[in-house]
Image (tube, grey):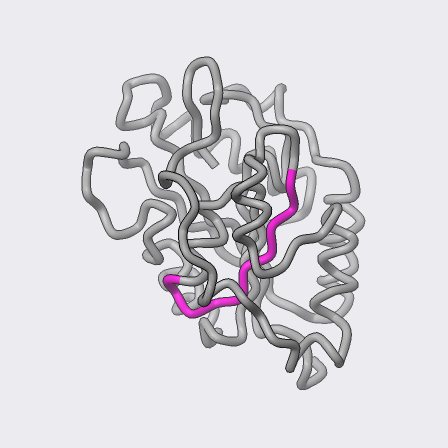
């Protein structure tokens, strides 16, 4: 693996790797996001370890079981081939855990299991809490906005990309390894939150 490549890339699940279905416990409803399969394939060709870091508060809310979360995970691994690591937080917003994004716990745990330095890790997500979790862990956050991404979250992100293939181009460029990133210096704009949905959600 080339020296300018990241030591790991960690993806948010819902709205980033796969289409966001609120509190989804049905593997049949798992669909890749546009360019996601191609992006994952290309990163693997570079030899970059890949992981998934996902809030699944539906478990704490009683809307999902751990078995359903595991079934969806297996389906994601079937579609993309198995990821090197999964780190999932089942807690709710009021639980005060250290793993739930925007806290850094999921990212730090995934990095530890991969043997990757957080500062050489890229975290990719579609909302502000993904980027803030990356910042809290000392990792590089890249936001891939979707229709649910708030304008202030886009404005606060140090780096953005139009889709996951664009993320691959961004992180695999030798010039990007030393590029200045503004995430640490941008103040939070608006409350930390989950995706705005009719019934809430995971990530």
- Which residue is painted at 46% across and 76% down in the image? 117
- Picture layout, residue 101 above or below residue 173: above
Task: Assess whether residue 112 is covered by the magenta stretch.
Answer: no
> Where is the N terminus found, in terms of image quarters?
bottom right
The residue most toward the top is 198
- Which residue is painted at 77% across and 74% down in the image? 173
Question: Which residue is nearer to you in this view: 128 or 109?
Answer: 128
Residue 130 appears left or right of 3: left
Q: Position of residue 134 (x, y in %)?
A: 46, 59
- Place residue 141 in its image quadrant: bottom right
Question: Which residue is nearer to you in this view: 136 or 15?
Answer: 136
The residue range painted magenta reads: 136-145
Q: Position of residue 97 (x, y in %)?
A: 22, 46
- Place residue 104 in its image quadrant: bottom left
- Picture layout, residue 20 above or below residue 156: above
- Place residue 181 in its image quadrant: bottom right
Residue 143 appears left or right of 65: right
Residue 104 appears left or right of 97: right
Q: Position of residue 49 (x, y in %)?
A: 60, 65
Q: Position of residue 65 (x, y in %)?
A: 34, 24
């Amino acid at each position: 693996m080339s020296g300018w490549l990241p030591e790991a890339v960690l993806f948010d699940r819902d709205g980033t790797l796969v289409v966001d279905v609120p509190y989804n416990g049905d593997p049949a409803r798992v669909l890749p996001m546009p360019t996601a399969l191609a992006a994952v394939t290309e990163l693997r060709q570079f030899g970059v370890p890949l992981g998934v870091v996902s809030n699944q508060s539906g478990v704490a809310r009683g809307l999902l079981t751990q078995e359903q979360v595991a079934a969806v995970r297996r389906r994601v691994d079937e579609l993309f081939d198995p990821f090197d690591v999964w780190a999932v937080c089942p807690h709710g917003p009021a639980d005060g855990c250290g793993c739930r994004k925007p806290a850094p716990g999921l990212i730090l745990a995934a990095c530890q299991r991969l043997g990757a330095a957080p500062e050489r890790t890229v975290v990719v997500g579609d909302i502000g809490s993904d980027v803030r979790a990356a910042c809290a862990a000392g990792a590089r956050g890249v936001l891939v906005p979707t229709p649910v991404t708030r304008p202030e979250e886009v404005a606060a992100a140090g780096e953005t990309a139009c889709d996951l293939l664009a993320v691959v181009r961004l992180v695999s460029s030798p010039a990007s390894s030393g590029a200045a990133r503004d995430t640490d210096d941008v103040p939070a704009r608006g409350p930390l939150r989950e995706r705005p949905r009719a019934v809430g959600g995971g990530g």
